[in-house]
Structures are given as C-alpha cells and as structure tokens.
C-alpha cells in the first residue's frame, strides 16, 4: 500500500511539473513578445504579436479548475473558477471576438500584468513540484506581485470590455433573438454588462483570498 501511495505521489508531481513548466514557457513567450512589440512598433502591435501564445497559455489554465475539483492541488475551486473564467472571457469573449479592441492602449497593461504574474506563478509551482523547494525571493514574488499585477489586470479587463460594448451592441454577435425553436433569447451585450457588475465583489473576494494566502505563506517561511 505504501509503495502504491508513493507511486501516486510521484506521478502527481511529474504531471504537475510538466504542466507548470509548459504553461510557464507559454507565458514567457507572451511576455517577451509584448516587450519586443512595444519597443519595435508601439502598443498598437501588441495583440497581433501575442495572440496565439496568449490563447494557448490562458486556455491551458482550464486544467487548473479540474486540478482543484479532483483535489490534485490545494487551491479552492471558489477562488480558481472565477479568476480563470474571467480571464477566458477576456481572452476569447472580448479580444478574439472583437478585433476592434486589439489596438487599444489598455491591451498592453492587461497582457503585461497577466504575463508577469503568470511567469512568476508557474515558475514557483514548477520549482516546487520538480525540486521540492523554491528560492525565498521567488516565494516573496509569488505572494507579493499581486499587489500591483492584480489591480492593474482587473482595471484593464473592465476597460477593454467597456471598449468592446459598442461593437457588441452593433454586431449582435452571440445573441439569440426570439422567435426561435428553443423559445429563449440571449443578449451577449447585457450578459457581459452583468459580468462586469460582478467584477467589483469578485475583486474584493479574490483580493482577500490573496492577502490571506500571502500572510500564511510568508509567516510559514519565517518559521522554517
């Protein structure tokens, strides 16, 4: 039984190591491309430079919801689900769906905040699963970078969605009008507006969660 438990732990750590390092490389690519695009052509060229690696890296985060549900990681679903769902909505429901947003200046702080936070986070968990430890400086970054990255990301997400609103309304993309065989109507514009209204309470909930995580992780590091 002990040998079986040991093999399960090894497989879990191997899987999570591979997963974290692959997604880490995706976000490194995003961050490098953002910087190069800014230096070469300005903020208008950022989205075109990062679209594919962004879609890969952000969509791969769906696995983290499953990891949380099945107990592969300790992160609660209540914190993982809203954060990743919101990111996926911005990645696919706004940026990919409405190309008119691509050249806006808010796309740059959005992608920068995401990529910096994720490069730190995935390298932290990659080190932890691969080697069983993390350097103290990386631990500090993992639980402190959100102080800047999280508010910047949230403000940029709301801003980019607001910019897309006129194009949503004019195009009626993803809308379902009556009459139809399902006797049901759906308006993507109003659904997105409702989601934006939930951002503020969601922001406060996740911020409290991150602050509690930081306090616990850094206080534990001081005693070891």
Image (cartoon, grey):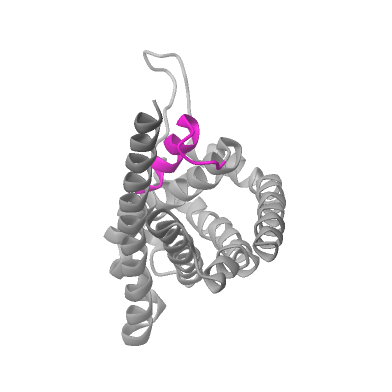
- 81 or 76, nearer to the observer: 76
Task: Judge whether 134 appears above or below 208 on screen.
Answer: below
Position of residue 199 in the picture relative to residue 62 (left or right):
right
Quarter of the figure that contains the N terminus: top left
| Viewer can see residue 115 | yes
- 96 or 18, nearer to the observer: 18
- 103 or 120, nearer to the observer: 120
How many marks the image carries: the answer is 0
Q: Give the range drawn in magenta.
A: 60-75
| Viewer can see residue 55 | no
Query: Residue 198's image quarter?
Result: top right
Task: Judge whether 131 appears above or below 34 on screen.
Answer: above
The x and y percentages for residue 37 are 33, 79
- Queried whether the magenta region covers residue 21, the answer comes back as no
Position of residue 19 in the picture relative to residue 124 (left or right):
left
Position of residue 156 in the picture relative to residue 216 (left or right):
left
The x and y percentages for residue 123 are 42, 63
The residue under the point 64% across, 48% down is 199
- Report the predominant secondary structure element of the magenta stretch: helix
The x and y percentages for residue 107 are 46, 67
The residue under the point 65% across, 49% down is 206
């Amino acid at each position: 039984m002990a040998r079986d438990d040991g093999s399960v732990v090894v497989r879990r750590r191997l899987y999570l190591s591979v997963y974290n390092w692959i997604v880490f490389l995706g976000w490194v690519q995003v961050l490098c491309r953002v910087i190069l695009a800014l230096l070469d052509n300005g903020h208008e060229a950022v989205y075109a430079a990062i679209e594919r690696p962004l879609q890969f890296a952000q969509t791969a985060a769906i696995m983290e919801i499953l990891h949380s549900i099945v107990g592969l990681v300790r992160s609660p679903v209540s914190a993982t689900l809203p954060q990743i769902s919101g990111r996926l909505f911005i990645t696919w429901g706004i940026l990919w769906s409405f190309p008119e947003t691509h050249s806006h200046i808010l796309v740059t702080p959005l992608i920068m905040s995401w990529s910096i936070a994720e490069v730190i986070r995935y390298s932290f968990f990659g080190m932890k699963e691969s080697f069983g430890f993390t350097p103290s400086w990386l631990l500090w970054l993992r639980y402190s970078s959100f102080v800047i990255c999280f508010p910047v990301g949230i403000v940029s997400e709301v801003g980019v969605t607001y910019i897309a609103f006129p194009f949503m309304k004019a195009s009626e993309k993803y809308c379902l009008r009556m009459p139809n065989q399902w006797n049901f109507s759906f308006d993507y514009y109003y659904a997105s507006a409702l989601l934006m209204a939930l951002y503020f309470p969601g922001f406060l909930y996740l911020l409290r969660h991150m602050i509690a995580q930081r306090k616990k992780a850094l206080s534990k590091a001081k005693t070891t």
